[in-house]
């Protein structure tokens, strides 16, 4: 089944409660560690935070899966989901497009900075490096659990609901901007480019597994690069 980007997701008129639950869990998992400094000894905060995030994201992914599964079953019954081979094709296209866009954005960044040596490092990447060094368990969250949860939230819930009313372009702009802002990085355009690819592949396949695979691949490359540099 071919899915043009203009084809809406046909979500419910109002956001369903089962779409709100994953957002609430995600916010709790993300925000609670900030309070640890007020009631835990400093020498155990890092370890507790690591376990909290690992367990919290695991629970969030499992609960979110069951909250969103009815939508996937509906699209499958309607014949909207691509077959496995087409899905693999779009994952490959997505990876190629993602790195083409990332290279383009970095070249523009270097040109605006007056040379590649003047380009500022990614704040988010630096934070990931520091976090993984302190809490090795976070590798699982960065490479696997984080991408899965972010695709559930930003692509399925937010983009899916918005696109049924605003269409592809405006939905991508809104969710892509939020996706970039939540990472609190100085590389805003990189996250917008990533969001565009994830949204496009999700629309074309109607399978959340496709953008998840691209997201996991990208984060895995980042973590491997971190180890290579160290």
Image (cartoon, rainbow, N blue to C red):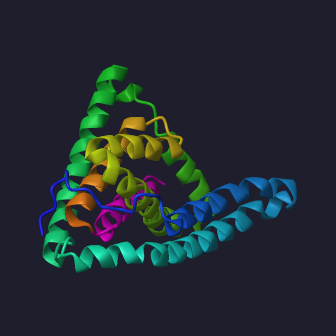
Counting from the top left corner in percent of width and height, residue 88 is at: 18, 70
Q: Which residues are magenta?
A: 207-230
Q: Which residue is located at x 57 percent, y 69 percent?
A: 57
Counting from the top left corner in percent of width and height, residue 227 is at: 45, 59
Relative placement, left or right, of 26 versus 85 is right
Determine if residue 176 is in view.
Answer: yes
- Give above or below for 107 relative to 39: above
Q: How many marks?
A: 0
Relative placement, left or right, of 74 versus 146 is left
- Give above or below for 109 relative to 89: above
Counting from the top left corner in percent of width and height, residue 16 is at: 49, 65
Locate residue 206: give its quadrant. bottom left
| Closer-to-camera residue (172/217) | 172
Q: Which residue is located at x 46 percent, y 75 percent?
A: 65
| Closer-to-camera residue (126/54) | 54
Magenta part mainly helix, strand or loop? helix
Q: Residue at the far front: name it.
A: 13
Relative placement, left or right, of 152 versus 77 is right
Residue 149 sits inside the magenta stretch: no
Counting from the top left corner in percent of width and height, residue 35 is at: 78, 55
Q: Which residue is located at x 36 percent, y 60 percent?
A: 215
Q: In the rendered view of the protein, which quadrant contains the N terminus? A: bottom left
- Give above or below for 87 relative to 130: below
């Amino acid at each position: 089944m071919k899915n043009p980007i203009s084809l809406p997701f046909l979500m419910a008129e109002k956001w369903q409660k089962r779409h709100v639950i994953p957002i609430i869990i995600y916010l709790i998992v993300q925000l609670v560690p900030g309070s640890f400094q007020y009631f835990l000894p400093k020498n155990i905060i890092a370890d507790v935070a690591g376990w909290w995030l690992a367990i919290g994201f695991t629970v969030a992914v499992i609960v979110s899966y069951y909250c969103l599964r009815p939508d996937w079953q509906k699209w499958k019954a309607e014949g909207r989901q691509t077959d496995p081979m087409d899905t693999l094709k779009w994952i490959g296209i997505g990876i190629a497009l993602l790195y083409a866009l990332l290279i383009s954005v970095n070249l523009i960044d270097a040109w605006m900075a007056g040379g590649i040596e003047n380009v500022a490092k990614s704040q988010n990447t630096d934070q990931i490096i520091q976090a993984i060094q302190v809490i090795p368990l976070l590798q699982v969250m960065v490479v696997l659990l984080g991408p899965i949860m972010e695709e559930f939230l930003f692509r399925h819930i937010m983009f899916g609901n918005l696109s049924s009313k605003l269409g592809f372009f405006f939905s991508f702009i809104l969710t892509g901007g939020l996706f970039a802002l939540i990472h609190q990085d100085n590389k805003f355009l990189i996250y917008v480019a990533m969001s565009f690819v994830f949204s496009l592949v999700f629309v074309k396949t109607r399978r959340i597994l496709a953008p998840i695979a691209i997201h996991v691949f990208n984060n895995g490359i980042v973590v491997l690069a971190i180890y290579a540099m160290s």
